[in-house]
Image (cartoon, grey):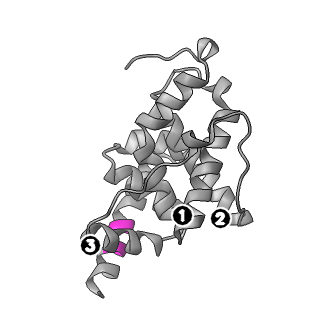
Amino acid sequence: MVKIYVRNMDEKVFLEQINSHKGILFKVSNLYADDAEDRKDLRQEIIYQCWKSWNNFKGDAKFSTWLYRVSLNVSLTYLSKQKKAAHVNGLPAEALYFEQPQLSERAELLYTAIRQLNEVDRGIIMLHLDGYDNAAISEITGISKNNTGVKLHRIKQQLASILNKK
């Protein structure tokens, strides 16, 4: 793991990191927002909150781990407050918009099933599907490692039940 020391980072480095990890932004926004405009708004809010807390990122964890943590926290706040249209100051507008990749029919079905889970469970399964182990998921979500394993097992059962109904 390459440590990134934020104190010397500028806007360009921040935008490069966000761009190279934009898949996380798409995954999170697809799971926590129902329509295209809300997804775009949520991605903007995540980027804005990352930019605001950029100086707090010390490089002790991977950037992707930090980004997931911020993204999940913002998404949960976004849902609870049902925020709309965040205004991002200080960043170029073109840096905030990414073209949504086309999803296969199977991926759409999976996203639809995952959206039926509660907010915390969506984040846990997303991290699991992204290849994070229980220890990393525990670190990102703040849930104990054992509880993460139990939750994952139950989430998988729920998803299997949802998908079997289709």
Q: Quadrant of the N terminus?
A: top left
Q: Residue at x 33, y 71 (%)?
A: 108
Q: Quadrant of the C terminus?
A: bottom left
Work out whether mark 3 precedes mark 1 in sequence or the reverse, and give the earlier one: 1
Task: Look at the picture and state if 78 lies above or below 105.
Answer: above
Give the vertical position of 26 relative to 119 (above or below). Answer: above
The amino acid beneath tag 3 is Glu
Mark linked to residue 79: 2
Q: Is residue 166 visible?
A: yes
Residue that label 3 marks = 105
- Highlighted magenta segment, given as a residue range: 154-159
- Residue 52 placement, left or right of 1: right
Find disc 1 in the rendering and name its residue: 32
User: Which secondary structure lies at badge 2?
Assistant: helix
Residue 121 appears in the figure: no
Foreground label between 3 and 1: 3
